[in-house]
Image (tube, rainbow, N blue to C red):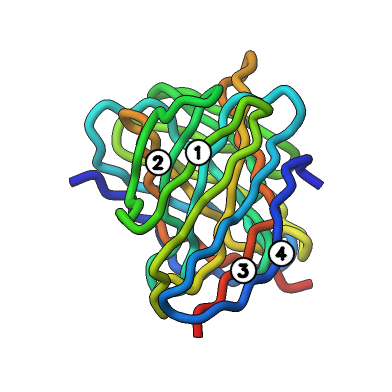
Amino acid sequence: DSGVTQTPKHLITATGQRVTLRCSPRSGDLSVYWYQQSLDQGLQFLIHYYNGEERAKGNILERFSAQQFPDLHSELNLSSLELGDSALYFCASSVVGESGETQYFGPGTRLLVL
Amino acid sequence: EDQVTQSPEALRLQEGESSSLNCSYTVSGLRGLFWYRQDPGKGPEFLFTLYSAGEEKEKERLKATLTKKESFLHITAPKPEDSATYLCAVQASGDMRFGAGTRLTVKP
């Protein structure tokens, strides 16, 4: 158990719909990363937040948005869903220590768009 | 464009047969190189972060090394429980770019 929690574990929805994925980082971790993993694209970086502020954007579609709240949990909003958005969505929190940055991944949310 | 290439795609070893996995990269301004292992249906598990050429880190049967163009993950005397997909990722300017992974199978 990494200490990072994600809800829901599974989500089935229809094309055109909107969903929200939630991530709670490990206690004390200020950084949250969001990733998408699909069979054809592999693991793709979406966005990084640090203490409520957006730090970096990767391959995140305009239909997707995210935010990190004052209590440090984060939400990833996916709208106008398409079949191709079906994937595993992971968040990770990170801490920087003596040996560098360590990222702890959550168990993921499996999204199926029908 | 930044690229991360892992080889081989798949590797089958006998228990105790040591080997190495490769991660080659082309990025501008490498900030860090990460190694993870991932079991099917689960989130990646952090292994190492390397920052500069010549750096090495070890953990149990695993040792990661870094040069200016590639990183190696050496597995010494692997056991069946080491079977997993091993992913590397490079971080540059905040962006994280992953390789496609090496699927390792260790037979008893």
In this view, the residue farthest toward the front is: A17
In the structure shown, which secondary structural element does the residue marked by tag 4 occupy?
Answer: loop
The numbered mark at residue A9 is 4
x, y (%) of residue A73? Answer: 65, 36
Position above or below: B70 against B30: below
In this view, the residue farthest toward the top is: A98
Q: How dense is the environment of label 3, judged by Cα within 10 Å: few (below 14), some, or many (20 and up)?
A: many
Q: Which residue is nearer to you in this view: A73 or B75?
A: A73
Q: Which of pointers 1 and 4 lies earlier in the amino acid sequence?
A: 4
The numbered mark at residue B96 is 2
Q: Which of pointers 4 and 3 lies earlier in the amino acid sequence?
A: 4
Left or right side of A107 for A103: left
Q: Amino acid at mark 1?
A: Gln
- Marks 4,3: beta carbons within 8 A: yes
Left or right side of B47 for B49: left
Q: CA distance from mark 3 to mark 1?
A: 20 Å
x, y (%) of residue A58? Answer: 34, 45
